[in-house]
Image (spheres, rainbow, N blue to C red):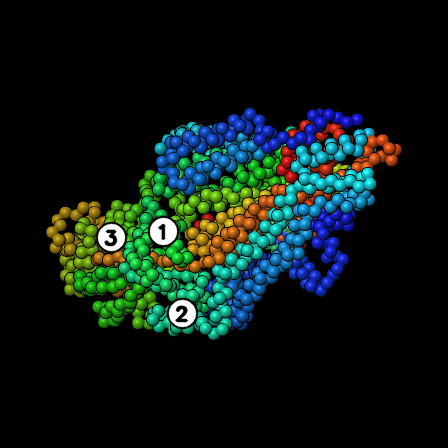
Amino acid sequence: MSNNDQAATAGPAPASRQKAARKPRRSRILVDFMGSMSLAITLLVALAIASVIGTVLVQNEPYTEYLIDFGPFWHEIFAGMGLYQVYSATWFLLVVAFLVISTSFCVYRQSPGLLKDLRRYNLQVKEKSLRSFHSSATGDLDQPQDAFVQHAHQVLKAQGFRAREKTSEGQTVIAAMRGRWNRMGYLLTHVGIVVICVGALADGTTLLKLNEWLGNLEIETRSVPISEVPRSAWVPEWNPSFRGSVEIPEGASANVVFLPMREGYYVQELPFRIELEEFRIERFSTGAEQSYESDLVIHDPNRDEPLRHTISVNHPLIYNGYAIYQASFADGGTRLDIDAIPLGAEALQELEVPGRVFQEIEVPTPAGDTRTIEFTNFQSENVVPLLNEEGVRENRQMGPSFDFRLMDRTGHGLYYRNYQRPALQEGAMYFLSGVRESPADEFHYLFLPADADDSLERFRTYLAMLHNTEVRNEIARQVARDDDSVPNEQSQAIARTTAELMGLFAEGGYMAVHEEIERRVPADRIDEVRDLMIRILHAGLQGLYMEVLQDEGVVSIQEEEQRFLEDTISAINAISLYQSPFFFHLKDFEHREASGLQIARAPGQSTVYAGSTMLIIGIFLLFYVSYQRLWIMARRRDDGEGTHVVMAGTSNRHQVEFEERFAHLKRWIIDQKPVGSDPQREDQNKNA
Amino acid sequence: MSVPHEALDFERPGFFRQLQLRDWAYFALMAAVAVISLTFYGENMDRYDIGGLILAVGTSAWMGWFWRPWQAFSIIVGVLALFGIWLYGDNLAANETNFWLNYIGSGQAGVMWMSVFLYLSTVAYLMGLFSSSDFPSRVGAAFAWVGAGAGAMALLVRWREIYLTDPTWGYIPVANLYEVFILFAALTTLMYLYYEQRTGSRNMGAFVMLVIAASVTFLLWYMFDREAHVVEPLVPALNSWWMKIHVPTNFVGYGGFAIAAMLGVAFLIRNRLDRTRPDAAITRRIPSTDTLDSVMYKAIAIGFAFFTIATVLGAMWAAEAWGGYWSWDPKETWALIVWLNYAAWLHMRFTKGWRGPTMAWWAIVGLFITTFAFLGVNMFLSGLHSYGEL
Ligand code: HEM
């Protein structure tokens, strides 16, 4: 503190500092080093740098990810340095520990002097030292000494100083101070820091690490059912502080939580069992979650009756020092009744697939192969914000959907999301199925047109008929016959072509048709032939459609029916890209959700809060109370009349403001003139 | 010659004796606002709402006593905001048909006016720096007042607009980057105006308003490019009473640090000019290094004090929302880094008595660290604070 250092050379300085200068004992040197500013700043910077590392390097990822990111060489080094869990690395804790020790030493060293400062007024000053102060003044007054001293006291009192006075050998010394709370601020700030760190240490993972180090605990890295986790990865109830999470499906219960730890986890035992009765989500009109809550039942052997309580986001339950938070939610294994509708000749013969979310099921394909379907999620509500015709945002309810992955024998496959109910899209209804290569991609959608009953019946019928060779041939013949513009002898050839094109289209969409044309026709005639072929194909597809409608009993074709055909053709064309032999249609479901709970025990929390309060109060005292000392020395003037005055002052902060204040004090005390009423200057002093 | 004591002005009137009639009138007005709000809406308020109301009104009353210009400012802003809210009634679409709402008094229009006036203020202050007259800087200050007022009004009106968009969405508009940028611009401007008045050196504005203009530019880009002003509902974790006090407290901190950094720039320029061109007019027009140093310290002190409170409040909120008061989430960690940086700055000043260019440079570097904590974390790092993404 420069100002005090200045004062120290001048005499009236904090006592502790002077002593330290006089007797440099060995223990003193240690105390000085541990409490030194240089050490503290070094540690603060070290802590800051470590913190930066911890944010730049994503923490607590699976080790395999790091291995991919950094390669084996750097991975070893980073892992060895604890960079994947910086904040619980030993060296990091050591830095914090040193910071605490350093601050403690600082407080230990300063507090005796500080406390003395609060009481000691130091009336033993010498005139010479007062004159050497940065803020110092002298004056010769006509006023008698007594009157002056009385006047000085009055000014000091009015200005908020506490003063002591001593007279010896005709010389009066007044020592005054104000803003003593500033010194308390210094203590509170630093003690607050120590208290916070101690509280935080109690809540950290140190105890677990110690037990790990002693060989009592060993983390589990595999994801296996809890019954297979070895006892060495179980943390008993004695653990006073932890923070972990657990997912409980509706109707189920748990008496453990999982503590994530480096590349694995521990299983923490709880002295009670938490049952989830029901989980609810409240949604905004946009479909975004507004809040979610869980009805919990706590079964504790020490209770006569189970405790029922509902928790929600931001409203945890604190039970016996265990805080239970609503953290997340997930599917709890919803039961799904699904029809696998073959996208081919067997389109009308669906296969029942009863499944659950997170389950894998083998499905035999009509071609004699098998596929594995893995259900990954279920969503009971989907709301999509869309702009309506007037450009106003509107939320469309899309109903339930489920996500799955469909794999072939080699384990390869795409990701899908199917909606249960048909959705309105530009005036018509469609069953939607999204498909993507990886969860990071956007979905591409397959639109299967729904018929008037909102069912897939008509589409399936059409698809099945299109895949049937006999039907195709029959339709092709009809179409060729009905076309009057074609001479009879050509009609058979046309019928053959039509049937063939329809077959190609059924198997591979337009792509297959184009490829076939390119294979057979010389390059210079392709365009011409293609147009013709597409017309023939469309005539065939239209003919087939008429057949389907006739079977249904529809006689006149409206715009709607025409559109249905176009949609059907687009859908069949897209099937070849869809890469699934089935369309999985959700018939029914029984929703079961799981609530993600975060459970923590933090006995140090109130300590941390207490330390924080001290810190905040301390900071305000430090910044907004300025500690000022003033000395006034008065003696009879050498000529025997009047009074000779020396006045000096010092402050530990705000040098500029103090000089101004000192000037005011001088004017009042020595010059005995008004400072004038410059309100701005007054204000400045008040707030200094 | 001794003067009778009555003629000397050392008697410090007690705090309450310094208050004038207008101060008491302002207090009465604030009390009336509280009472009226409680009478009419008290039924719909829980104890947190009531606590928040009393805290807000009390803070405002105290601000009015502490800094008189706040009285007129808060009354004008309050009346304009109420007028806008009244014009809305229950109809959000009113802003398309009503002239006042469309052009002046809606949240969106208010932000535009804030931007315009803060830009103009910056230009005026810069002209003031190079002119021998005080006039441009006075204009700059006036524009800054209007800009801050428009921003404050915009936030208040937006608060109502959010409820009008969808009553179930309601939240205080300090929840996303768009809203906090408005808060930052208005609040920092006010803090600057306070220092300007207390020191009487207007020419600091040319420096401080630059950083505010930069933040306005970001805000406008964010608004036009990303449609950031569109109201979206909150994620559940943000729906908390803590947010209302945590965020504004934090921004007093950011504001103080931003002002300090810009004064650091002024300090370095003045320091250099003192050596190279001590007699030039421009040198004298930049406030003295002593003044700059002192205001820089004060800005960092207030910033640090509030930043500390904000961090503690954040920890208490995290304890409720995430199940632990400290998770080493990147945003939290960066708040700690910012805090450590300024703690080190203050220690150097307190214990080593450091002054001068080093501290000015350090304050400037501090703003970069702060900016990273404020924006960079959202852009480059992922974590629990995933809202407010760019
Ligand atoms: C991060 C935690 C902190 C650490 C490790 C720390 C450490 C230290 C150390 C080692 C000293 C030197 C003491 C001596 O000279 O004997 C010191 C002094 C000081 N610290 Fe801190 N401190 C911390 C936080 C704070 C905070 C938050 C403030 C308030 C703004 C503060 C204000 C001061 C002041 C005013 C002094 C000078 C005391 C004097 O000599 O009168 N410290 N600190």
Residue A265 location, x and y as percent? 42, 67
Name the residue rendered at 47%, 74% in the picture.
A215
- Select label 2 or label 3 by which is in front: 2
Indicate the amino acid at tag 2.
Trp
Asked whether disc 1 touches disc 3, contact meaning CB atoms under 8 Å apart, the reply is: no
> Are dots 1 and 2 in contact, CB under 8 Å?
no
Residue picked out by circle 3: A421
Which residue position holds label 1? A312
Mark 2 or mark 3: which comes first in sequence? 2
Q: Chain of mark 3?
A: A
Q: Which mark is residue A234?
A: 2
Q: Secondary structure at mark 3?
A: loop
Q: Position of residue A533 (x, y in %)?
A: 25, 58
Q: Chain of mark 1?
A: A
Q: Chain of mark 2?
A: A
- Please tell me which residue lies in front, A180 or A657: A180
Q: Position of residue A103 (x, y in %)?
A: 61, 57
